[in-house]
Amino acid sequence: MIQVEPDIQQKLVILGSEAADEVTDVPATRSIQQGIRHATGFIYTARQEGGGTTRLFKVLQTNACRFACAYCFTSCAIRRRRTTFRPDELATTFVILKQQQRVDGLFLSSGIVPDADTTMEKMLATVERLRFKEGYSGYVHLKLIPGASFEYIERAVELADRVSLNLEAPNPERLALLAPDKEFTESMWGRLRWASEVMRRARQEGRRAARSLTTQFVVGAAGESDRELLETVQRAHRELGLWRAYFSAFHPIERSLLADQTAEDPARVMRLYQADFMLRDYGFLYDELPFDAQGRLPRDKTPKEAWAEQHLREPIEINRAPRQLLLRVPGIGPRSADRIIAARREARLRDLSQLRALGVTTGWAAPYVLLDGRRPALQLRLW
């Protein structure tokens, strides 16, 4: 039987579409509720942290994989067409897309075959060709391969702007249900720790290195609780300097080991992101999060609203409260808290319209604040 290798366009279709489950930014509330994917084939439009968007060429080096992960398109247990980009092919393809002004950056992931180091060699060769032969100095997000050797992790940190490794599950017990061939403590968490240390040393020595470290979790496939996930996230923020955790709601894949399992509610993902913001940006501790007896976050309100209902017994005076207390008020985020502090240096804040102009979601904030000693008039929210 003669087998014909796919051409470049066919590889793009296969290896671009199968990279879709890699999350590249935090979805907006509307996107989560309506299931919107901001992707066109292998080009993914992601929001930037400071505003605006960027177009990422989101692709796999290969969709062949030696692991039989129950949640994954590239699982070796699923019969599908397998193909691989050679490093020169993939680098050239990216350069063409960049010259055509179709993409702004590269997001490179991969299946794992025949082993971690061989896979990382090909991914690194792709990025090295871009950096040193093609002269590309723009954004690269490079996935780290579980179990890869230290020198490959170090080289990835040197070449990329962001590196990540998907933990997929919050602990070894849950990972065993999702990916029985993978090892959590050393191959995954340990490699994230190595990357974090390389980044830390590079910053101290003034050398170029990736600016941020991220991870991703599959939500709802292994029976994990919100408490388990967020306990691991807080540990990663504290021990690894994790910039962000991404959450991907489980959805069954035809012919996979979990094909008959129910898809996870995207609203759960939204609550996990909101709780992580509380840990990362709002000064909350993991023990303060409003879990129920089963370790779940509320679904009918934000975690911050649930916390406020339990703990903000007295309203907070907007004109005097320190920043850390303002951040405890629903509807006030880091940017609006800073604007409040700047505005009240100039004049007393006496009306909800002033807070609204500063970026506060006043429908959430109004029950918990005083404005110049007075409670604002409350208007019931429609939803």
Image (spheres, rainbow, N blue to C red):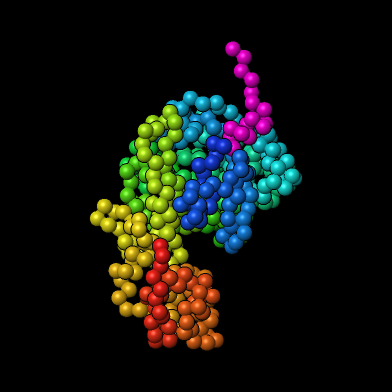
Q: Position of residue 43 (x, y in %)?
A: 62, 44
Q: Does the magenta stretch include residue 128?
A: no
Residue placed farthest to the top in the image? 1
Residue found at x 54% / y 32%: 63
- Residue 361 visible in the shown view: yes
Q: What quarter of the picture does the N terminus occupy? A: top right
State which region is magenta. 1-16
Please tell me which residue is depicted at 58% across the width and 52% down the height of the picture. 46
Where residue 104 sits: x, y (%)? 67, 50
Q: Quadrant of residue 320?
A: bottom left
Viewer can see residue 107: no
Q: For this view, does 102 lie left or right of residue 355?
A: right
**Residue 291: image x %, image y %?**
30, 58
**Residue 285 place in picture, x, y as percent:** 36, 64
Numbered disc total = 0
Q: Which residue extends farthest left?
A: 293
Is residue 360 shown left or right of residue 229?
A: right
Q: Per the image, is 14 magenta? A: yes
In the depicted view, which residue is nearer to us: 205 or 215?
215
**Residue beneath the point at 43% across and 28% down:** 255
- The quadrant of the rendering that contains the C terminus is bottom left
x 33%, y 64%: residue: 306
